[in-house]
Amino acid sequence: MALTTLSFETPDALTDAFAQDLVSILKTGIKTRGRASLVVSGGRTPLALFKQLSETDLEWDKVDITLADERWVEEGHEASNTSLVKKNLIQNKAAAARFIELKSDVDDANEGVNAAESNLASMSQPFDALILGMGEDGHTASLFPCSEQVLDGLDMSSGRTCIAVQPTTAPHQRISLTLPALLNSRNIFLHLTGEKKKQVLLDAIENATEAQKPITAVVNRAPVTLMWAP
């Protein structure tokens, strides 16, 4: 396990530092490989970060952006991570970035897995940066504790990039990057705010199995930088 914790006094201070780090990473990817790739998560926590990134000078036309997971809902639905990213990150200067979608125009996420994997294959990999969140149950991406699909998602030998997930504790069918796909990243960040989330993470690391708290599977297997503010 290699968890590096960077603590900030306020969420604003975290956002400023995080945006600078990400821009530096993406610039390095562009300079050394011609393109850079960024994987992001949904939710409210990264919204300020997305806004700041969107207004930052960068060769955004050389950046690919995708999601760690997506709910199987129509774009425009309040639960759509695609809509959230398009409205908050792929705006302003960052509007030139290329967005790689996980969801396709089929009724069931199981039918969309192959299309999602094909889309992801067009991105520069390993991903230059991955930003993960975490739920209070210890899930990350859409790898939910003790769901029927969690062991498939955590299987390092599956050869799969994506899986379809039907969580029992959250609404909407989903598609999620698998653990090996998430770990195929040069820089992995866990973006959390609040004492409660930090305690959930620490308890998971100390007391839970990977199936019980899937975030531990990431922390156990790769260097992760925790970006945290109260």
Image (cartoon, helix red, strand yellow):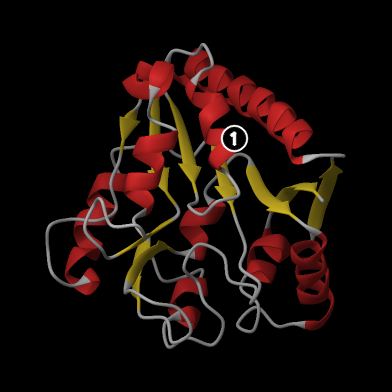
Q: What element carries label 1?
A: helix
Residue type pointed to by label 1 = Leu
Above or below: residue 171 compared with residue 198: below
- In this picture, residue 217 sits left or right of residue 30: right
* Residue 155, image x, y percentages: 49, 74
* Residue 150, image x, y percentages: 48, 80
* Residue 40, image x, y percentages: 49, 45
Residue that label 1 marks: 49
Closer to the camera in the image, 181 or 108: 108
| Residue 226 in sight | yes
- Residue lying at 82% horizontally and 51% vertically, measured from the top left: 230
* Residue 7, image x, y percentages: 85, 43
Q: How many residues crowd around disc 1 within 10 Å: few (fewer than 14), some, or many (20 or more)? A: many
- In this picture, residue 181 sits left or right of residue 12: left
| Residue 160 in sight | no
- In this picture, residue 18 sits left or right of residue 202: left
- In this picture, residue 178 sits left or right of residue 16: left
- Residue lying at 69% horizontally and 70% vertically, measured from the top left: 216
Considering every residue shown, the one lying at the far left of the view is 106
Considering every residue shown, the one lying at the far front of the view is 78
Quarter that holds the N terminus = bottom right
- Residue lying at 68% horizontally and 27% vertically, measured from the top left: 21
Q: Across the whole image, how many numbered discs are drawn on residues? A: 1
Q: Where on the picture, by quarter, is residue 64?
A: top left
